[in-house]
Image: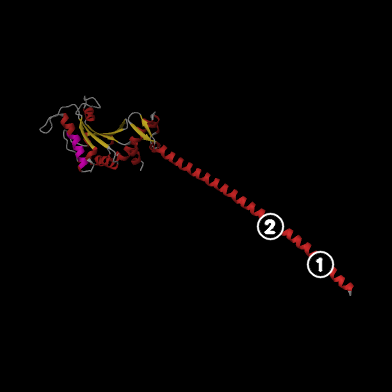
Amino acid sequence: MKKFVLILVASATVISCVSKKKYVALETENSAIKSELQKTQVEKEDLEAKFSAIQARVDDYNTKISSLSDENVNLKVENDIKFETVGDVAVISNETKKAMRETLKQVDQEELAQAKTLKDSMNLAVSYNLQKSLDTSSLNEDEDIAINIDETVVMISISDKMLFNSGSYVISNKADKILQKLADVINSEPSLEVMVEGHTDAQSIRTDKIRDNWDLSVLRATSVVRKLQNKYNVAPEKLIASGRSSYDPIAENDTRDNRSKNRRTRIVILPNINKFFALMGN
């Protein structure tokens, strides 16, 4: 009996020892897991902090890139609106130069080859655009209309036989087509100023209403101005009437044909070059 009791006690002691060792081992393992978890948590927080720092740097770079893009856009806009002087008579922006280059692609290449300076190119482009706008081909008398550019001023010379009867300052009905076209160009561009010049030949004239060639040249200019204002609604503040009599001839007054050339009305258009190209580019 005693022996049996001793066996039971011994067995209980062994079981107790085994359970305690296992418990200690589990405790140790648990501690190790907790330690590893804590280490992992610290590493996670460290990685999150590093990621936040990287993200902040990325955001900063993106902001700088966006800022540089905005600056580039602003610089492009500033560059486009920068003005360049053309001789001593006008200024032209880079944006206008682009429009001018597009126009020059359509100009006769032989004429373009003669343009040696920016001013030459600008004059050629303005002349091309204005002639295209006037479209004198529909008049069937384009030999009596000449368009020239002098220092960026557009000058349209119209033979008097297209506007007046001989010795008269009353505008004939056959002038309607060309005056309508002129009015359309003038009315479409607010910045234009227009001077109408009357020119005569050297043969003296005197009637009950006309004292001399000065009178005739001025009366013809004012007739054109009144027609542009009253029939074609051109703002009068844009218009200037002047007479040159016979003192600015383009040919000798020695033949009938030459005298005919000198009898003319010249329309002088002074455009704002940048606005002019914006208009003609449409």
Q: Which residue is mark 1?
A: 15
* Residue span colored magenta: 219-229
Q: Nearer the viewer, residue 225 or 199?
A: 225
Query: What residue is shown at x 64% (from left), y 54% (from top)?
Result: 41
Q: Horizontally, is 163 left or right of 38 in the view?
A: left
Give how far across and how far down residue 142 sits, in percent.
Answer: 28, 36
Give how far across and how far down residue 54 sits, in percent.
Answer: 57, 47
Q: Nearer the viewer, residue 205 or 151?
A: 151
Q: Which residue is mark 2?
A: 34
For residue 207, the mark is: none
Give how far across and how far down residue 217 sits, in percent.
Answer: 18, 32
Does dot 1 land on a helix, a strand or a loop?
helix
Q: Quadrant of the C terminus?
A: top left
Give how far across and how far down residue 76 sits, in percent.
Answer: 43, 39
Dot 1 amino acid type? Ile
Q: Quadrant of the N terminus?
A: bottom right
Does dot 2 land on a helix, a strand or a loop?
helix
Image: 57 above or below 247: below
Query: What residue is shown at x 23% (from left), y 39% (from top)?
Result: 237
Dot 2 amino acid type? Lys
Q: Nearer the viewer, residue 184 or 53?
A: 53
Q: Characterize the magenta stretch by its predominant secondary structure.
A: helix
Q: Is residue 65 magenta?
A: no
Q: Nearer the viewer, residue 89 or 263?
A: 89
Q: Horizontally, is 97 left or right of 217 in the view?
A: right
